[in-house]
Amino acid sequence: MGNDYKIRSERETCYGRADIFMIPRDKKRIGFVIGFNRKTAFGHR
């Protein structure tokens, strides 16, 4: 995968930014944006 995609990650999370970007080296391929969310326990923030 490392040869087909450039992998970039955002250091600052929780600000509405995606966590991981998979940018294709071949522009004919599909890129991916992956975001992660954390779920807290009921009644906690």
Image (tube, helix red, strand yellow):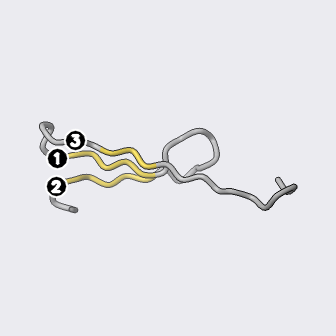
Q: Given the image, on which type of amino acid does mark 2 rest?
A: Asp
Badge 2 or badge 1: first in the primary sequence? 2
Residue 19 image position (x, y, % from top left): 49, 50
The nearer-to-camera label among 3 and 1 is 3
Give the distance between the C-alpha atoms of the residues marked 2 and 3, in whole angstroms: 11 Å
**Residue beneath label 1, please?**
25
* Residue designated by label 3: 30
* Image location (x, y in percent) of residue 35: 49, 48
Q: Quadrant of residue 39?
A: bottom right
Residue at 75 percent of width and 58 percent of height:
40
Give the secondary structure at mark 1: loop
- Please say if the residues under marks 2 and 1 sit with CB atoms less than 8 Å apart: yes
Residue under the point 15% across and 37% down: 27
Separation (CA) of disc 3 from disc 1: 10 Å
As helix, strand or loop, the secondary structure at mark 2 comes to loop
Residue 7 position by quadrant: bottom left
